[in-house]
Amino acid sequence: MNITIESSRIVKPTYKGSAPSTKNHVRLSVFDNVASSTHMAVIYAFNPPTPSNIAIEKGLSKVLAEYREWAGRLGEDAEGNLVIFLNDQGVRFIEATVDSKLRNVLPSKPTKEIQNFHPGLYGVEELVQVQLTHFTCGSLVVGFTAHHQVGDGQAASNFLVAWGLATRGLAIDPIPLRARNTIFKPREPPLVQYDHRNIEYMNEKYAKTMSITSNESNEEEIVIHKMHFTNEFINKLRAKASAGVSKPYSRFETTLAHLWRVITKARGLHGHETTQIRISVNGRMRMDPKVPNEYFGNLVLWAFPRSKVRDLINRPLRFAVELMRAEVVKVNGSYFQSFIDFASFDTVNKEGLISKEDINKRILSPDLEVDSWLTFPFFDLDFGSGSPHYFMPTYFATEGMLFLLPSYLGDGSIDAIVPLFKDNLDTFKMYCYSLD
């Protein structure tokens, strides 16, 4: 496969009427500060016929006028606070071609090669990057990267949908809610009710030790496995876990609980060990008052259900589901407000705390982490020729870092991307479709 970069340029916002000042900045919220300070990347594939690069670029320029932060730059204000400078410096826009048909080169799961279809993730000044790669068959792959501290998965997917609307000449609806400096107010006096020092944060010196210890394994020992859970299989899992309860457990809860148990079996852990799973919790519908889905920024904290390995494996599926639900329920409006109270003052800097999101770990065993994109409208991106026929995250070789995606089939089935040690893969395959 030969990829040729045809052009690389900066795209800036296009405004209707007079442009706003480029001298302003917006301070990162407490939720932005605890998000990972790196780019995340996704890959879209579209069947022909596809819109021209010019049309897609014009749509990008239009949508950046509503999502100005993506066209800005990260930096510090005079007080040393992390901010986004609203300077309209623009986003990176790359055009590329491949001397092959899409079906011959695009893998069905994340691999190292897929990184060729999006710009690099490290040492990047731009907060958004786009790469349009055209194939000899007329297909188009769109690689999109976005800095996580500017927006979470909900915000990024909203932006992508809006980009499609702008490209098609339609009004952007809904308009993003840009209120990160006004919406999260600490109480006076603050009321910190939870141990945020050790849940969202940790001591910087200890974090460096953890990072070194967890990266001793060779990346070549980790394999990315993709599995497809049919709607029929998921319904069987739900029926098994929900027998006798008044309200069936969700697709997400039962699928994730099943994966937690199967991966734990495959790892061959000792029964007395403790395993936990880190689950992202969207605060938009949990805060009081609720925050609209169109809020542009980060609004995520995490739940940490944990269990002894022997209990997780030997007890029924419902045991794992109930553990997960109980911990997720705890991350409620009260918890989010407590975090705001803790993180709004100077405690983090004074105590040398850093976000656990920025710990560079390649091995999570005996634990897991999940990024669930089941509710995000990623498949609603439409530049004018219909929805993508393929969508996935980039290559991410961290053992135990799971991604759950809605299948492109649109029938309620789920694709799970599971990085494992090669030595554990055969055992995982043995159990992954078992209802036991």
Image (tube, rainbow, N blue to C red):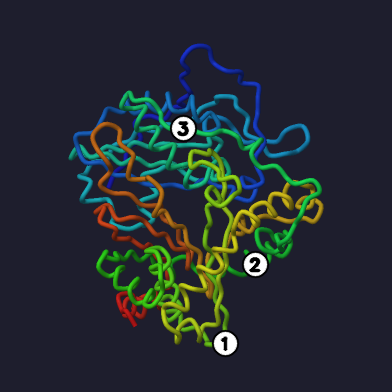
Q: Position of residue 349 (x, y in %)?
A: 77, 50
Residue 272, numbered circle: 1
Q: Nearer the viewer, mark 2 or mark 1?
A: 1
- Give coordinates of residue 109: x percent, y percent: 32, 58
Q: Could you tell me which secondary element the residue under label 3 belongs to?
A: strand
Q: Is residue 165 left or right of residue 178?
A: left
Q: Residue at x 20, y 45 (%)?
A: 101
Query: What amino acid type is highlighted by mark number 1?
Result: His
Q: Are marks 3 and 1 in contact (CB under 8 Å)?
A: no
For marks 3 and 1 on the same chain, the one whose residue lies earlier in the sequence: 3
Q: CA distance from mark 2 to mark 3?
A: 34 Å
Q: Amino acid at mark 3?
A: Arg
Indicate which disc, 2 or 3, sits on the residue closer to the N terminus. 3
Left or right of residue 234: residue 15: right
Instruction: Verify CB contact (< 8 Å) between mark 2 and mark 1.
Output: no
Mark 3 = which residue? 92
| Depth check, front residue: 355 or 398 | 355
Q: Give me the C-alpha separation between circle 3 and circle 1.
A: 50 Å
127 over 379 or under it: above or below: above
Q: Give the class, few, some or many, for how many residues have Cα within 10 Å of label 2's Cα (few <14, many ≥20).
A: some
From the top left corner, tell me how far across and down residue 169 is, in percent: 32, 23
Disc 2 residue type (three-letter): Met
Q: Nearer the viewer, mark 3 or mark 1?
A: 1
Measuring from the top left, give residue 86's x and y in whole percent. 60, 27
- Quadrant housing residue 263: bottom left
- To which quarter of the image does residue 417 belong? bottom left
Direction from residue 347 to residue 292 in the image, left or right: left
Q: Which residue carries the number 2 mark?
A: 210
Q: Nearer the viewer, residue 277 or 322?
A: 322
